[in-house]
Image (tube, coloured by chain):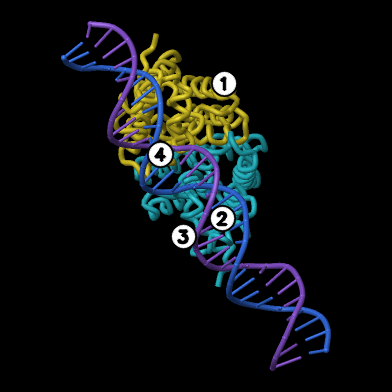
Chain colours: A yellow, B cyan, C blue, D purple
Amino acid sequence: MRSTRDNILQATAELLERQGYFATGLNQIVEESGAPKGSLYYYFPDGKEGLIAEVIIRTGREIAGRIRVHLAEIEDPADAVQSFILAMARYIQDSSCRGGAPIATVALEMAATSDRLSVACQEAYDLWQGAFAEKLLTSGFAPERAQRLATCIISAIEGAIILSRTKRSAAPLEQIAYELGALLKATPRH
Amino acid sequence: MRSTRDNILQATAELLERQGYFATGLNQIVEESGAPKGSLYYYFPDGKEGLIAEVIIRTGREIAGRIRVHLAEIEDPADAVQSFILAMARYIQDSSCRGGAPIATVALEMAATSDRLSVACQEAYDLWQGAFAEKLLTSGFAPERAQRLATCIISAIEGAIILSRTKRSAAPLEQIAYELGALLKATPRH
DNA sequence: TTCATTATAACGACTGGTCTATATAGAGTC
DNA sequence: GACTCTATATAGACCAGTCGTTATAATGAA
């Protein structure tokens, strides 16, 4: 049995992924999690911002771990990246093209407004970039190139998720999977 | 002297680019535009959703035009794309890393909720993709490849803008400019 | 008793949206 | 020109409802 606190965190994470910061109300979180409303401010005395900051940080770290695991399973870096993005495409299709960007919406909504959330989103993106860069580094890419490519990969994924959700089709993700694979294969590693 | 209706549209466009759908209130639009509140529902009887749908459509078309103009100025497709993205990076830096994604935020917030806004965002992205694809086509890229690359370019740009706004630095955009240039130069066009 | 947790209700601020009254401007008629 | 008539546009008070937040009371186990 999960604790009340964990129930709140998980319900918030799910709502956040689909709706973003503003569309997700505390009442909805209470309702969805089944947690008593009184508990919300008991466990999260900083209110909505504190709760969501913690969700962002947790989600960011969890996904960074998933990226690392996935990339470690395939040796060739181009194949590994391509495979990860295609897995992502499947996940998005399974969510009826409504999920897949747990950080992006909040980042766009709040990065200029809340320092706390801005920092949380930043940490998430830095962790993801580090995971990709590390894989490229150990595959023989030069350090700056690995960093640049990691930025490019994350950017393309986040952008393609926006397109996929808007068009309600996983095609954009599949297309960038193909092209990023080509980019990693066709260009020299240094 | 701009008309009241145009004042409302422009103020909404500016607010939308920085804040997204939910954070932009009608009262704020009224205040920022200097227009009387009574005029808002006179010109936009469909309310907030209708007003913002029109802003999205207008903005999408205007930017599509800017893409076309910019790409037409440089013959080599890789150089043209790279130059456009670097111009974008400058624009974002000039906005203190707060602007640059007039569609993305709304797309993420509302694509699953409002069909009307979803369609509007879709049209914008399709126009942009068409502008890039056309340039690649006339440069000798095969049709499907041109489409795929156009998706990849737009995805990378939108994603890099998220990163740039979150990190408050234009570096991500500059990095993808470099890598997309490499992708277009290093791979065969068919 | 003690303490962590949950319940309840209310707060003030704000939201998008509606309403009615008023002002303005131009056309047509005398 | 002066007059009405009419559609367009402005003005802002007002509504019901929701938001995040808080204060306080009740509960229950150790």
Which chain is mark 4 on?
B
Task: Sort mark 4 into few (<14), some (14-19) or many (20+) by Cα contacts within 10 Å.
Answer: many
SS type, badge 3: helix
Determine whether B113 is above or below B88 in the image: above
Pointer 1 residue: A90
SS type, badge 2: helix
* The image quarter in which residue A146 lies: top left
At which x and y percent is residue A135? 38, 22
The residue depicted at 47 percent of the width and 20 percent of the height is A80
The residue depicted at 41 percent of the width and 51 percent of the height is B92
Instruction: Identify which residue, A124 or B187, lies in the foreground.
Output: A124
Q: Amino acid at mark 4?
A: Leu
The residue depicted at 63 percent of the width and 38 percent of the height is B147
Pointer 4 residue: B163
* CA separation in Å, label 1 and label 3: 45 Å
Q: Amino acid at mark 2?
A: Arg
Q: Amino acid at mark 3?
A: Glu
Residue A22 visible at all: yes
At which x and y percent is residue B57? 62, 50
Determine whether A57 is above or below B98 in the image: above
The residue depicted at 57 percent of the width and 21 percent of the height is A90
> Going from the N terminus, do you reach mark 2 or mark 4 first?
2
Instruction: Identify which residue, B178 or B52, lies in the foreground.
Output: B52
Location of the C terminus of chain B by quadrant is: top right
* CA separation in Å, label 3 and label 4: 31 Å
